[in-house]
Image: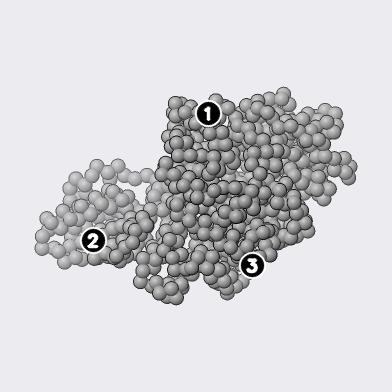
Amino acid sequence: MKISLATSLHLSHAGVSPSSLPGDPLQMQSFVPIGLLSLKATADHAGLHSEIRINELNGLVNRGVISDNGHFYENLTDAILAPDDGLVGLMTDADSLHHTLIIADTIKRRSPETMVCLGGPAASPIGRSILERFPFIDFVVRGEGEITFSELIRSLDHERQFGGVRGLIWRDGDQAVENPERELVPDLDALPVPFFPGYEMEQDAALYLDVGRGCPFNCSFCATAPFWKRRYRMKSIGRITQEMTLVRNLYGRRHVNFSHDIFTCDRKWTHEFCDELIAADLGMTWTCSTRTDLIDRPLLDKMAAAGCTEMYYGIESGSQAGQAEIRKHLDLDESRKIVRSTAEAGIHPITGFIVGYPTETLETFGRTLEGFFEFLQIGGFRAHLFTLCPYHESALFEASPQVALKRAECFDLPLESAESLRTDELRQRYPIIFASSHRYVCPQVPDDLIAASEELSPKLVMLKSIWPLWLAYYESPLVWYRRWVGWIEDYNAKTRPATRWPHQCDPGDLLMFATEELDRLGAADSDFAELVRYEQLKLRAYSLKSAPATRSQSSGIQSKNTRVVKRSDYLSAPFSRDIHALLAGERSAGMPSQRWIVCFKNTRGDLSSIELSPMAMLLLGIVDEPKTVDELAGAFSAVTGSSSDKDRSLTNCTNLVHELIRHDLVEEVV
């Protein structure tokens, strides 16, 4: 039997803004589909001789293989469905379940004899409801899918009796039949290594290795623990290092993400794992997630030595009372210490906060917002502010299945109007099925405060230098936030009246708001004002082209006849305060003379900013075309009026050219 497996759609939210229009180019998050590769490996290991193809849809969209031209779902189906496919398996995730179901409907319409199966965390807890409402779905694999999916294939190949396949929900005529649950695999090492050759390993696709499954905790808002039945299991250290070595040797991967919510649940195991990695010296870096109460400074130091570069901590609530309410039970003072220690150990800490609980009050909302900014500053790297998603099987949702919901204002694919209308109608018709695209109604918090938080945190992090100075002008972050929400709602109504996201923004909108606030706050001549100007310069520089990937092999400036030319496009502006001191958290009393900040992109596309003297800036402005150092010295002297001492002028010019070459702004013409 021919089988096609396809990933769910994952939007790159950085590629969407409130200005996005229907039919704009789609930017997706491409990833290595480890789950589907594991399904194929298990089926092959079981001796099933089906031909299984794996389609990573997000990468195909990014490469232009699948286009958004008004026939998006037909184009997706073209990529997934081949003649004589007996079964199509579709991965599901909360954010894109509506898209997955429309894909399934299109597949069934095009090929009625092809069976359609869903699996993954979005479909698993509501499989019966999906089969009862959508006749184009034939199967849903619940929970851990490898063994269930293989047994489903065997049944399709032979007797087609599905009643004995544990963990399967299947269609018997018009009825949805839910078989008994399947026990979890006790030893994850018993599963075969994912079939990595089944996917064209794109180097920009995120790689999340499946190193363990399950969480023993009981946070009320989360569906991860119930999905894995609150069982915590890890692969063996040898198995994890085997998979790391495999992706390094075969695909040149030097960085992986460990897919597990609480990687350090067993601290003794984690110490042993790090010892093995240090001894093996694989030359690889990695990231993971855990809780702040399951780690300490000695373990952080060892993880850093073993190659850990980033750590995600879910803090969730900035209120100690809120911690008890959601059953997270973190000590926030201890969490602060751990996040600070993580940064000190050389690991980038990422913290996550959530607003929008049904019991949310303005006080808890404000405390969480305050925590977001505080932990962003403590960690110095990145923080997330999420709006609570109603997940099926979470204790919070299960306790109040008829809880009031409202449509979320999170970004979705900016599809052509007819396609977009189709997704909207589907979600409006079945709000409980698509609960994850809705949000809880919070009776004690205005709706606009919840809605405006949806996509805000990436922009706040992008401008993280300004918050310690800006927020000092307000009684609390909540006071700032309420002013901001009113401003962006009014701004969008005037400038983007057709937007689907009336409370969302671009980074430039935040800087425009900051500029308007300067006079009201009496801060027009302040460190804060200078940082706003600096961030505006950086934001404009993001549109610059990257420096050329190759550069001449400079032998150094050998003589006044050495020719040089500008290497990188740049933007610049003069500043009267020490910007680097401000970025380091120091106050600036101003400088005796102006210094210039120059922003440009390196060969990797990363934005760099450097400080130059007025003389270096003057020289940079006259090397658009190749010139000898002698010619530059002459032009430089003419502009500065220092032509009386040619030797000194040549020496000064040579030193400045060296400085610009060191900063990668100028290169020798060979």
Disc 3 secondary structure class? loop
Q: Amino acid at mark 3?
A: Pro
Q: Residue at x 47, y 36 (%)?
A: 299
The residue at the point 46 percent across, 73 percent down is 516
Is 179 on the left-hand or right-hand side of 393? right
Mark 2 to mark 3: distance in Å?
Answer: 54 Å
Q: Position of residue 13 (x, y in %)?
A: 57, 54
Q: Secondary structure at mark 2?
A: helix
Q: Secondary structure at mark 1?
A: helix
Pick whichever, 638 or 116, lies toward us.
116
Reading the image, the residue beneath label 1 is 241
Depth check, front residue: 138 or 108: 138
Q: Residue visible at 61% across and 28% down?
A: 193
Residue 461: where, in percent of width, then height? Answer: 48, 56
Query: What residue appears at the point 38 percent right and 53 percent down from the top-left corner?
Result: 608
CA–CA distance in space, label 1 to label 3:
49 Å
**Mark toward the viewer: 2 or 3:** 3
Please determine whether, in this image, residue 632 is positioned above or below residue 306: below
Q: Image quadrant for the N terminus?
A: top right
Instruction: Please indicate whether residue 515 sits to the left or right of residue 364 in the image.
Output: left
Q: Which mark is residue 615?
A: 2
Badge 2 local density, few (<14 within 10 Å), some, or many (20+)? some
